[in-house]
Image (spheres, grey):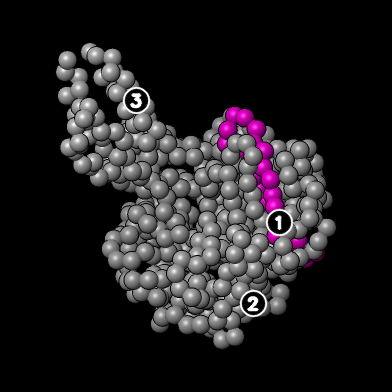
Amino acid sequence: MKSSSLSLIAGTVALAAVTGFAVLTAPGDTSAAEPKAATRLPVERSSLLCPAPGRSDLAETTYTAYTPAADGAGGGAGTAELTPSTAATADGTAGGTGKGDGGKEEDKKKDDKGGKDGKGDGKSGKDGKGDGKTDSTKPVLSLKEPGKPVTAEVSGAGAPALVGTATGRLAPGWAAQQTTVVEAGARGLLGVSCTSPGADFWFPAVSTAKSREDYVHLTNPDDTAAVADIELYGPDGSLKSDVGEGITVPARSGVRVLISTLTSEAVEDVTAHVTTRTGRVGAAVRTADDTTGSDWLAASVSPNGTLVLPGIPADATSVRLVAFAPGDDDADLKIQLLGPGGPISPVGNESLHVKSRMTAGVDLKDVTRGEPGSLLLSPTKGGEGTPVVAALRVVRGKGDGREAGYIPATGPVGAQATAADNRAKGSTLSLTAPGATGTVKVIASAGSEGGEQVVKTYTVKGGTTLAVTPPVPSGLKGGYALTVRTESGGPVHAARTLSRPQDGVQMFTVQTLSDDRGTVAVPDAVQDLSVLDD
């Protein structure tokens, strides 16, 4: 073979390694074949991270993991496990110096089930119930097959963050959730979908007010330490902080940071921006309020000119919108509530001006007026608009019976999205079509302890929100998963609400559903090997 041909082939192969696509032609040939369309193939590996469930000895947490059944998903049998982090979650400070696990009095209480500081012997028992701190050498959950969820339970404050990986046919669409019930103190029904690791997270609607106690939970899935920064922005811009930089998250461990310790300013509406200098983390915020309990706040979708915040309960007594524009330009947003009958503009709050790098908040009060809805934020002048992030703080109930939950802006369900933890009672599925009418298929999986899959199709009219009691598997025993798949029409956004009324308190939690990215586009290479002829 000629050396010139060798050089050409080597260069083309190198290009293919970078771009994933290559076309080989003879020197001087200008009639290269047109590239084929990219093929979508199932992912072969997925990672999920679950934050430590809480600081209360009275907490009861259920973990649920699930992979939707799909034809041709992945290769080989595969595995999917969620395993405790190798080190207990600690209260972090800048530079990675931990304060230990006993920062608050409630952490020092003795857990009846788990011993001192909620630390048990790690044995899970036949029924899957743990007794405080789990055994770091054994998975909390192991998924054996797609199409059927698995669950496990732990009690007390000692449960660590979880690190998980799924491979083969269990990787595409793998989802997990932790749901915690706390019946006293910072009470609440707390739910959070376990997240993929990343390097950039936005959390509008956190607070440094004296009535709030918000923690950023950072979980590192890798075998080397990660270093993270937390920036805070209030209504007047950046909040001065000397301790939000260089937070070390040890390998395969979790760190929680009390947001109010990062600044001396007490501010109601704050946006937290979590980034990593090295490594990657999973990030979530656990909020707690003196009067409205506690819940998790998941990260907002990446900054965008138009945002959808789906799933506001019909009986919401207070809705507060918090938005932030991270770029150099101000944002002028049109606020619309998408209800069952179509879009309406809240009287007196038809628009919101968000100054560059300043957090804006507006109280929309009981904007739903007894009907379920979703919020659509779009540029007042049309076009792409200025990118923003946003979240809602939603309150249900009145007086001492109030309970708060959070709804971050989220992307559409896309090809497929899943809520792993659902119950026979107390679940509501909200479907929103902000543009054209869209049709989705909703799959209720087999139950974790018995029951068979049920499928139902819904059509959501453009500009509306459709709130339904989701289908329940026939003969259900245990919990089950809900998977939403786009069938036709415009994009649909979704959220699932779990409710558990108790002693006059309307405890609830909302999880948004966005595309699980269970497939990846792989370009096809078109090759002309005539250059190999001598």
Q: Amino acid at mark 3?
A: Gly
Instruction: Please give the name of the residue rendered at 72% of the width and 41% of the height, measured from the top-left corner.
Output: 247
Magenta stretch: give its range.
207-233
Quadrant (top left, top right, bottom left, bottom right) of the C terminus: top left
Q: Which image quarter: residue 91? A: top right
Above or below residue 516? Residue 98 is above
Return the residue at label 2: 363
Which of discs 2 and 3 lies nearer the camera? The answer is 3
Q: Compared to 20, does 149 lie above or below?
A: below
For the point 81% across and 61% down, which residue is it? 265
Task: Report the amino acid beneath label 2.
Answer: Asp
Q: Residue at x 40, y 40 (%)?
A: 171
Contact? badges 3 and 1 (CB < 8 Å):
no
Please state if 533 lies on the left or on the right of 372 as rendered.
left
Please tell me whether mark 1 sits on a helix, a strand or a loop: strand
Q: Which comes sooner in the sequence, label 3 or label 1?
A: 3
Which residue lies under the disc numbered 3?
Answer: 11
Residue 142 in view, yes or no:
no
Q: Position of residue 266 (x, y in %)?
A: 80, 63
Q: Residue at left 58%, top 39%? A: 280
* Quarter where residue 23 is shown: top left
Number of residue marks:
3
Provide the residue designation for mark 1. Answer: 232
Q: Foreground mark, 2 or 1?
A: 1
Label annotation for residue 202:
none
Vertical arrangement, residue 74 with respect to residue 266, above or below: above
Label 3 vs label 1, nearer the camera: 3
Q: Type of residue at label 1? A: Leu
Task: Give 433 or 163, whichever is nearer the viewer.
Answer: 433
